[in-house]
């Protein structure tokens, strides 16, 4: 979920509450608070935990809350995960350390330290296109027997690799998609859900497609997913969460507000994305 902000970059707590209510009403199963889409990179530590705590409080048991607590500093990730556990999250999502490019042994040690130190369910997150760090399936398999590691968000978009991952760890970890464009096909091959950007703006459709895929209704899953296929692509016209925040503004759910170095969606993309929102039924004529 995005972190709504005012034009000056301050967090819009009222809009945050409304977004939680929006997802609860739509049947969303879980919210990731302060993940990449939530601008984790530019929230300070106090804001980071405050947003997670507010989402937990507002959810009031209506849906699960997963706190984004990854960092390229193991110490920081450890502290954030511990604090998120203290404010009542159901699980934490930990992205691979970015920029410093750890080895596979470094990744293993990073995640093992956190899993051994904090008694909260933890979901690994591999998104090499964003982090310049790729956690191998073999490293995931080494971590799969850690009691506090319960799942992985695979955002590689590589279905063949994803199938191999499920074969290797699917009996020990919940494997989730983190790539909207391939999520339904991944789920039809055994993944158990989708941690989604597109669901920020059309949660009901995304949930319907996922439920159909989980129940083996391939035709229905693909049909529903096709209504969102254009959005899966256009929500990455510029770096996430720039386009999805603009879309939520068009829907009247948040005000314009994003933190530097990210900027508002370039004007040349407005008509393209607005038309796609209409075609998907997100905005009514």
Image (cartoon, grey):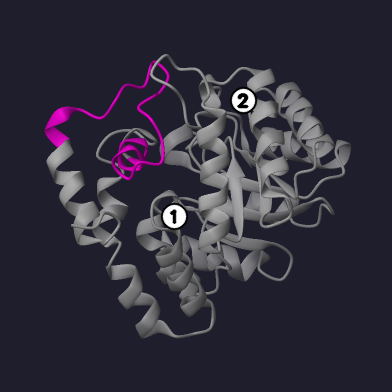
Residue 168 located left or right of residue 259: right
Q: In this view, does 13 lie above or below 10?
A: below
User: In this picture, which residue range is highlighted in magenta?
Assistant: 244-269
Instruction: Categorize mark 1 by other alpha carbons within 10 Å: few (<14), some (14-19), many (20+).
Output: many
Query: On the image, which quarter does residue 239 sit in?
Result: top left
Name the residue beneath numbered marker 2.
72
* Quadrant location of the C terminus in the rendered image: bottom left
Disc 2 to disc 1, C-alpha distance: 27 Å
Q: Nearer the viewer, residue 181 or 6?
A: 6
* Residue 125 image offset from top left, x and y in percent: 59, 45
Q: Main secondary structure of the magenta part?
A: loop
Along the polypeptide, which appears first: circle 2 or circle 1? 2
Residue 268 part of the magenta-drawn span = yes
Q: Which residue is drawn at 60% across and 30% down?
A: 97
Please say whether residue 246 is visible from this viewpoint: yes
Residue 34 located left or right of residue 260: right
Name the residue beneath numbered marker 1.
199
């Amino acid at each position: 979920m995005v972190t709504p902000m005012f034009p000056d970059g301050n967090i819009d707590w009222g809009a945050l509450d409304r977004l939680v209510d929006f997802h609860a009403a739509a049947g969303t199963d879980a919210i990731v608070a302060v993940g990449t889409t939530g601008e984790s990179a530019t929230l300070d530590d106090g804001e980071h935990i405050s947003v997670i705590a507010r989402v937990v409080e507002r959810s009031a048991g209506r849906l699960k809350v997963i706190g984004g607590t990854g960092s390229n500093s193991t110490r920081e990730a450890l502290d954030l995960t511990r604090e998120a556990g203290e404010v009542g999250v159901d699980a934490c999502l930990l992205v691979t350390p970015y920029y410093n490019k750890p080895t596979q042994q470094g990744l293993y040690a990073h995640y093992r330290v956190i899993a051994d130190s904090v008694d909260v369910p933890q979901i690994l997150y591999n998104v090499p296109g964003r982090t310049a760090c790729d956690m191998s399936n073999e490293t995931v398999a080494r971590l799969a027997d850690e009691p506090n590691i319960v799942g992985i968000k695979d955002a590689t978009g590589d279905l063949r690799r994803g199938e191999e991952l499920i074969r290797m760890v699917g009996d020990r970890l919940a494997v989730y998609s983190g790539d909207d464009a391939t999520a339904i096909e991944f789920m039809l091959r055994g993944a158990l859900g989708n941690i989604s950007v597109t669901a920020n703006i059309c949660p009901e459709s995304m949930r319907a497609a996922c439920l159909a895929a989980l129940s083996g209704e391939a035709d229905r899953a693909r049909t529903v997913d096709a209504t969102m296929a254009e959005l899966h692509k256009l929500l990455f016209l510029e770096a996430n969460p720039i386009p999805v925040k603009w879309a939520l503004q068009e829907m009247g759910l948040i005000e314009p507000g994003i933190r530097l170095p990210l900027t508002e969606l370039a004007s040349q993309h407005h008509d393209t994305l607005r038309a796609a929102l209409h075609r998907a039924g997100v905005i009514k004529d």
